[in-house]
Amino acid sequence: MPNSALVLFSGGQDSTTCLADALDRFERVETIGFAYGQRHAVELEVRPNILAALRRSFPAWSARLGEDHLIDLTALGAVSDVAIAMADNGLPNTFVPGRNLMFLTFAAALAYRRGIRTLVTGVCETDYSGYPDCRDNTMKAMQVALNLGMETRFIIETPLMFRDKAATWAMAKQLGGEALVEIIGEATHTCYLGDRAHRHDWGYGCGACPACELRAAGYARWRATLDQS
Ligand code: ZN
């Protein structure tokens, strides 16, 4: 399958936008998610809802959307720290060292088996520059390592690498109009506290954790640019 992609799909705003982008550009798209002992199962619960909503609203994308793979990585919980307080080094404590490297390795192994050449991940160094495993240099090195180690020619695509959250909202609007913006607002999940009780114009969440603040601020900036134009 030359024109196929495997999207690392967590159920958040970023990976959902990347999935829509891949569905727009590739003939065949599969998704992969990881159960790694997340503090809140809500991240895993929203994934099938998002896929179903995309299928309902975008028939052309539905025809391209293939299998969803959920990989059990609960062993990762043994090396993760889920407290939200900032650590001395300035990184949020939800940080699992090298987590994205592990995700990409599993994704690549699956893609190899499925004959898929392109891996798509929503990592971004604009908003989360504190996470070294999200940086562009890390992704470039990872692509080389995977291709050497699996003797293949994977391409790791990172459509959001240099976009901020406002630009990510704009990208969703461009790809799927208000229908996609609505799906992202209603169905995706970002809040560190797993809050699905409070609905804001930008989606569900506590409104106060770093993930909610980033998402809300990006949404406000994006809407402000729309109002000006
Ligand atoms: Zn929150």
Image (cartoon, grey):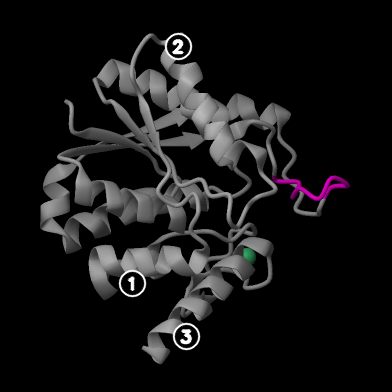
**Residue 148 numbered mark, or none:** 2
Location of mark 3 (residue): 224
Closer to the camera, 229 or 210? Answer: 229
Q: Position of residue 187 (x, y in %)?
A: 39, 63
Q: Is mark 1 within 8 Å of ligand 1?
A: no
Q: Position of residue 175 (x, y in %)?
A: 26, 62
Location of mark 1 (residue): 182
113 over 191 or under it: above or below: above
Residue at 46 percent of width and 18 percent of height:
146
Rate crowding at label 2 as few (under 14), some (14 to 19) or many (20 or more) other CA atoms within 10 Å: few
Quadrant holding the C terminus: bottom left
Per the rendered image, the range of residues in magenta is 87-94
Instruction: Tell me whether circle 3 and circle 1 mark residues in contact (CB < 8 Å).
Output: no
Q: CA distance from mark 3 to mark 1?
A: 17 Å
Q: Is residue 71 magenta?
A: no
Instruction: Tell me whether circle 2 and circle 3 mark residues in contact (CB < 8 Å).
Output: no
Closer to the camera, 182 or 73? Answer: 182
Name the kind of residue labelled 2 in the image: Leu
Name the kind of residue labelled 1 in the image: Glu
Q: Is residue 64 visible?
A: yes
The kind of secondary structure element at disc 2 is helix
Quadrant holding the N terminus: top left
Residue at 46 percent of width and 10 percent of height:
149
Q: CA distance from mark 2 to mark 1?
A: 41 Å
Position of 206 with respect to 5 (left or right) is right
| Ligand 1 image position (quadrant) | bottom right
Instruction: Tell me whether circle 2 and circle 1 mark residues in contact (CB < 8 Å).
Output: no
Name the kind of residue labelled 3 in the image: Ala
Residue at 40 percent of width and 49 percent of height:
159
Q: Position of residue 4 (x, y in %)?
A: 22, 33
